[in-house]
Amino acid sequence: MKASRIAVAGAVAGVAVLALSSPALAHVSVQPEGEAAKGGYAVLGFKVPNERDDASTTKLEITFPTDHPLASVMPQPVEGWDVKVTRSKLDKPLEMHGEKINEAVSKVTWTAKGDGIEPGFFQKFPVSVGTLPEDADELVFKALQTYSNKEVVRWIEVPQEGQDEPEHPAPVLALSAASEDGHSHGAADDDKASEDTGSAEKASAETSAASGDGDSGGTDTTARVLGVVGIVVGAAGVAYGVLAGRRRTTA
């Protein structure tokens, strides 16, 4: 009896933990690939889990911040989804690479061509953005998640420091400090640096191999010369021995 009570209590506790933790794991969220440094570029991944057992997620709308508009927003194609980029006029033009930008992306919408995100699955939607603001510590992206049964979940509540997490928090991107040279190095820069390093290592290896081949060639030549000298010396010794033998026979 005592053992069964302990088992029941453990099961109830487990259900309670799952009930409390599941909502926190099921939010639409945003995470950078690598880091998202102020003043730089980054690739952001919007992660969308399906919270329903009887419906699929068929549409995602991400609203970009208007207080810190991003001049460059390029979504990566996602198989099975159509993507639409909405641009809006800016109250205050941005300057990018010496040019003034009068409009920026205000929304990106993905619509499923087929079933979308089915129950028990999640999907990531990558977007390249820049330049990230230098005067902010975070960016808020409000999201609308639409299900196949027409239900719309609005992930738009902004979390406040010192308060409990809201029921439907908006995705928040934390920005890291810019590097010492004043530039951010994102995933693309890291890949390029890796390629350059690989090329340098390959060139170094080829140079070392060529140097090794040269030494081998020099060693072979020296060995051949010594071999010829040895043959000549040996032949001279044999000739000298034959002559010496003839002299002793004549005497």
Image: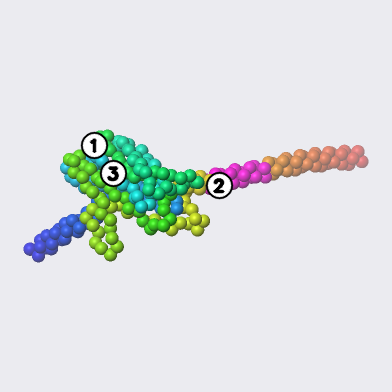
Which callout, 3 or 1, points at the residue further toward the start of the chain? 3
Q: Nearer the viewer, residue 80 or 74?
A: 74
**Residue picked out by circle 3:** 61
Q: CA distance from mark 1 to mark 2?
A: 47 Å
Q: CA distance from mark 3 to mark 1?
A: 17 Å
Q: Nearer the viewer, residue 66 or 150?
A: 66
What residue appears at the point 67 percent right and 43 percent down from the top-left corner? 214
Residue type, label 2: Glu
Residue density around tag 3, few if under 14, some if 14–19, many if 20 or more, within 10 Å: some
Residue density around tag 1, few if under 14, some if 14–19, many if 20 or more, within 10 Å: few
Q: CA distance from mark 3 to mark 2?
A: 45 Å
The dot on residue 200 is none
Q: Residue furthest top?
A: 113
Residue density around tag 2, few if under 14, some if 14–19, many if 20 or more, within 10 Å: few
Q: Which of the two discs, 3 and 2, sits closer to the camera?
A: 3
Q: Indicate the secondary structure of the residue bearing disc 2.
A: helix
Residue 1 visible in the shown view: yes
The dot on residue 115 is 1
Q: Residue furthest front?
A: 91
What span is in magenta?
197-215
Residue type, label 3: Glu
Q: Nearer the viewer, residue 33 or 228?
A: 33
The dot on residue 201 is 2
Q: Which of the two discs, 1 and 2, sits closer to the camera?
A: 1
Question: Left or right: 226 with respect to 216?
Answer: right
